[in-house]
Structures are given as structure tokens and as C-alpha cells.
Image: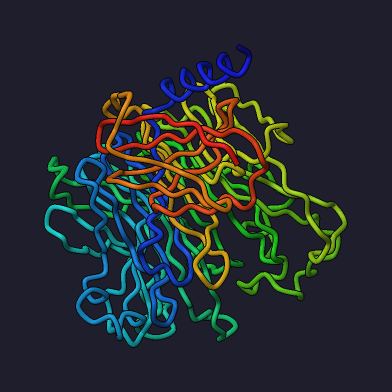
């Protein structure tokens, strides 16, 4: 009687969870690994990128949920794969209308320089975003700009990102790398065919060229709150946030977690460069961190930070998660749950250990990455988790049979996927092949759920 009760409880558990499905895309060639970076707020699109087969260049791609289609954003990769390493693209975020932001090789492919841009799923074209004109006389040589757009609001009105300029310092006559945060504002009302203009001023420091600059990675949907990281020039990455007032003033920049803003006041001898002549890193407190998510309304910002206080960069830093409320100005760190990668407007968080990097607002679509077997060892594969799909009808009998032989589960018949559970309802794995090895499982009773289209049946097996 007890066993029957457990099985019935398991079936109830499966029925309540039967609308979840995980897509792993292991059939694609992601030689250097891949990740789905962001889900559109309306759950229609998922954007990501991977390393291509040749040369390690990034390949951007978008999954269209309703069509169950994966689209490559590197036309050259599809047409000429042997030259794909010369063209790089990434998809970092996507709007509800299907405007994808990232970076793309707009110049001569031999330059290997990718710049901020956006890809229109309707027109299937990349468009380069405007760069700051006031830094042109500082560029050391042509094609010296690199960067990417990292975030777009759900309505497509705002894009955020950064550029990395290799610049010629007029005082010292040397190359200096400088990362400048950027915000672009849409100038028309057409979400499907947008046009963008760089919001100015972006940052005043690109004329003085101090240290390595800042990167914006995440943004609220109204474009007001932005998060990322900044470096003080000695290998310390401070957690940064910005508030945008949408006028001629600078972005209101704050070190949320970090020790010193060397980037602003570290040039003690006034030569235009922060270096050892300004005192070096003596006495610095070493930090590392980044913002991983800004909630849609901008009320919450979360990420990770590490700190050791020793003054030595090679000392191991232990990372802790943080959550910051932009309304109450309360910072919570050392979160018990771990390092949060996703945060919703109600303050609920999803942690790094889940592999999830983004979610739609209604929590129906999650995305991220997971480690899988690539045949030559473990590799990161892009992952999508679909919830609240069309309900699957559970029927007593499908034209599918299962049996076990020598710790291998065989599935005979037409099916979409196979799920294996313990008798207590814990999901062990989701499979699409008809021959499944169960060598690593303990002896005992398990439950197998076979899904075929919108129908499913549950069977019990013994190992």
C-alpha cells in the first residue's frame, strides 16, 4: 500500500510539473561552448552566442519560441563556414519586437574588430550604432574601436553598452585602452525599424584617458538604472551603477561595491595617465565584481563582489552575492542563497548554481547554459527552460513501450522526449534518444514519463 501511495504522489507531482521542458541544442556545433544570454520580456525571443568552428570567433543566434527555430546572426558563417573566424557576432539582449543587440564585424574582416550594433529579425540585417565623435582625434589608427551593445529595453527605446578605444595619449605619446560606457536612444516610434542616436555626453574622461574605464552590462526597461563594472587601473573591478537623467548631464555614476575610484582622481601628477608614478597599487584593497541583473522596473540590482583587503591582487578572493534596492538605497551582501544572476521586481532571485542567466517577466521562459558531454569532454551548451506550455494530456496508453536490459533503458515507438524520475518525484534526466544508459543510478524502482506531441504516459521500471 505504501508503494502505491508513493507512485500516486509521484504522478501528481509530474502532472503539476508537466508543462516544463528543457531545450539543450546539443545537435549544434558549439565547439568553444555557448550560452543563451537573455530572454525578451514577452517570452518570444531568446538571444545568445557561441564560439564558431573556425578560429574561435563568436557566433550570434536567436531562438524564436513560438516557431521553435534557431536563427544564426552571422550570414557569412552560414554561406562560408571556412572563413567564419573572420566575422564575429554576439547576441546579448533582445527587445519584445525582435531587435537584438550585441556586436558585429562591420569593417574589413581582417581587422578582427567588432563594434556595437543591433540586428533586426524582420530585415535580417545588422546596423552599426553611432560612436562618440569627440574621441576621433584621439584614435591611434583607423579601425581602433571595439565594443558591444549589451542591453536593450523591452520596448526598444534604449540600448546600453560600451566601447573600448585604443587611444593615443597626447601627453605621453603611448597607446592607452579606455572603456567608455554608452547609451543610445531611439529617435523614431517604429519598434520594428528603429533608428538610434548616441546620448551625449557619455563620459568626460575619454579626453583625459585615465585607466581602463567602465562597462555597462544591464539596464532597467525605462533606461534609468544601469549596472556593470569599472576598473581602478590596478586590476580591481568595482561594482558600478549609473542613474540616467536623460539630459545633458553625465550619467550619475556610483561605486556600489569597491574601495577607491582611481579612475576619477588617481592621476596625482597630472600627466593624463594613472600609473606607478602616481603611487601604484600600494595599500589598495582588491575587489572584483559585476552586476548580473537589473530588474525590469529598476527597483532591484543584483550581482557578485569579492574583497580581501590585503593589497595583493594574486590573493584568492571569495565571491559573495549582493542585492541592492534603488528606492530604499539598502545594500544586502553575503546572501545565504549564493550569487544571484536574475532578479525580479518583487525581489525574488535565481542563483548562479541553476545555470539560468535570464527570464521573461512572466517566468514562462528561462535561459542560460549547462555543462554537457560533447564527445571529447564536458562543454557548455545553451539551455532554454519552457514553462506553462500548452497542457500535455496524460493518457493511459501510448503506442510506446519501455524495457530495461543491463542498466540500459530502451524506448520503442514514436516519442518527443523521455523523463526519468525517482519514486519520490525528483527528476533525474530528460532525454530524446531511445537508448538511455542508467549505469550511474542505484538499484530500485523508477518512473519513466514518455511524451509524444501533446500526450504523455507514465510507466514504472525496476533496475
* Structure colour scheme: rainbow
Q: How many labels does the image show?
A: 0
Q: Is residue 243 left or right of residue 89?
A: right
Q: Reply above or below: 320 against 121.
A: above
Residue at position x 41%, y 60% in the image: 26
Q: Nearer the viewer, residue 229 or 268?
A: 229
Q: Where is residue 306 in the image (x, y as percent from the top left)?
A: 73, 49
Q: Is residue 61 left or right of residue 436?
A: left
Residue at position x 57%, y 41% in the image: 354
Q: Reply above or below: 293 against 456.
A: below
Quadrant, the C terminus: top right
Q: Is residue 356 visible?
A: yes
Q: Is residue 343 left or right of residue 197?
A: right
Q: Can residue 361 be seen in this view?
A: no
Q: Where is residue 299 in the image (x, y as percent from the top left)?
A: 49, 27
Residue at position x 53%, y 54% in the image: 437
Q: Nearer the viewer, residue 416 or 341?
A: 416
Q: Reply above or below: 172 against 130.
A: below
Q: Which of 38 and 29 is in front in this view?
A: 29
Amino acid at each position: 500500500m505504501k508503494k502505491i501511495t508513493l507512485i500516486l504522489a509521484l504522478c501528481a507531482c509530474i502532472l503539476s510539473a508537466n508543462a516544463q521542458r528543457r531545450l539543450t541544442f546539443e545537435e549544434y556545433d558549439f565547439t568553444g561552448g555557448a550560452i543563451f544570454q537573455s530572454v525578451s520580456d514577452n517570452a518570444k525571443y531568446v538571444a545568445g552566442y557561441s564560439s564558431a568552428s573556425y578560429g574561435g570567433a563568436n557566433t550570434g543566434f536567436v531562438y524564436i519560441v513560438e516557431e521553435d527555430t534557431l536563427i544564426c546572426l552571422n550570414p557569412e558563417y552560414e554561406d562560408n563556414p571556412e572563413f567564419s573566424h573572420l566575422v564575429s557576432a554576439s547576441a546579448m539582449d533582445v527587445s519584445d519586437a525582435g531587435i537584438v543587440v550585441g556586436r558585429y564585424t562591420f569593417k574589413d574582416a581582417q581587422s578582427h574588430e567588432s563594434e556595437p550594433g543591433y540586428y533586426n529579425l524582420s530585415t535580417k540585417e545588422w546596423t552599426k550604432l553611432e560612436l562618440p565623435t569627440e574621441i576621433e582625434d584621439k584614435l591611434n589608427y583607423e579601425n581602433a574601436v571595439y565594443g558591444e551593445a549589451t542591453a536593450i529595453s523591452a520596448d526598444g527605446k534604449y540600448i546600453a553598452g560600451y566601447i573600448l578605444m585604443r587611444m593615443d595619449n597626447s601627453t605621453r605619446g603611448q597607446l592607452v585602452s579606455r572603456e567608455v560606457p554608452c547609451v543610445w536612444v531611439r529617435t523614431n516610434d517604429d519598434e520594428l525599424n528603429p533608428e538610434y542616436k548616441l546620448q551625449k555626453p557619455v563620459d568626460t574622461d575619454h579626453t583625459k584617458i585615465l585607466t581602463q574605464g567602465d562597462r555597462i552590462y544591464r539596464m532597467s526597461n525605462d533606461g534609468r538604472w544601469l549596472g556593470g563594472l569599472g576598473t581602478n587601473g590596478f586590476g580591481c573591478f568595482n561594482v558600478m551603477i549609473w542613474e540616467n537623467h536623460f539630459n545633458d548631464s553625465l550619467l550619475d555614476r556610483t561605486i556600489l561595491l569597491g574601495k577607491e575610484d582611481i579612475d576619477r582622481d588617481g592621476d596625482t601628477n597630472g600627466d593624463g595617465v594613472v600609473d606607478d608614478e602616481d603611487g601604484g597599487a600600494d595599500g589598495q584593497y582588491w575587489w572584483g565584481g559585476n552586476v548580473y541583473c537589473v530588474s525590469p522596473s529598476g527597483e532591484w540590482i543584483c550581482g557578485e563582489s569579492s574583497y580581501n583587503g590585503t593589497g595583493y591582487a594574486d590573493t584568492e578572493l571569495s565571491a559573495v552575492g549582493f542585492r541592492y534596492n534603488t528606492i530604499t538605497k539598502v545594500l544586502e551582501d553575503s546572501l545565504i542563497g549564493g550569487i544571484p544572476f536574475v532578479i525580479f521586481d518583487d525581489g525574488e532571485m535565481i542563483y548562479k548554481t541553476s545555470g539560468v542567466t535570464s527570464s521573461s517577466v512572466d517566468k514562462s521562459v528561462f535561459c542560460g547554459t549547462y555543462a554537457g558531454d560533447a564527445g571529447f569532454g564536458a562543454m557548455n551548451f545553451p539551455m532554454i527552460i519552457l514553462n506553462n506550455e500548452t497542457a500535455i494530456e496524460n493518457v493511459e496508453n501510448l503506442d510506446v513501450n519501455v524495457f530495461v536490459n543491463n542498466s540500459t533503458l530502451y524506448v520503442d515507438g514514436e516519442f518527443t522526449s523521455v523523463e526519468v524520475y525517482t519514486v519520490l518525484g525528483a527528476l533525474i534526466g530528460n532525454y530524446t534518444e531511445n537508448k538511455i544508459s542508467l549505469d550511474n543510478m542505484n538499484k530500485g524502482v523508477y518512473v519513466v514519463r514518455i511524451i509524444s506531441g501533446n500526450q504523455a504516459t507514465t510507466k514504472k521500471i525496476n533496475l
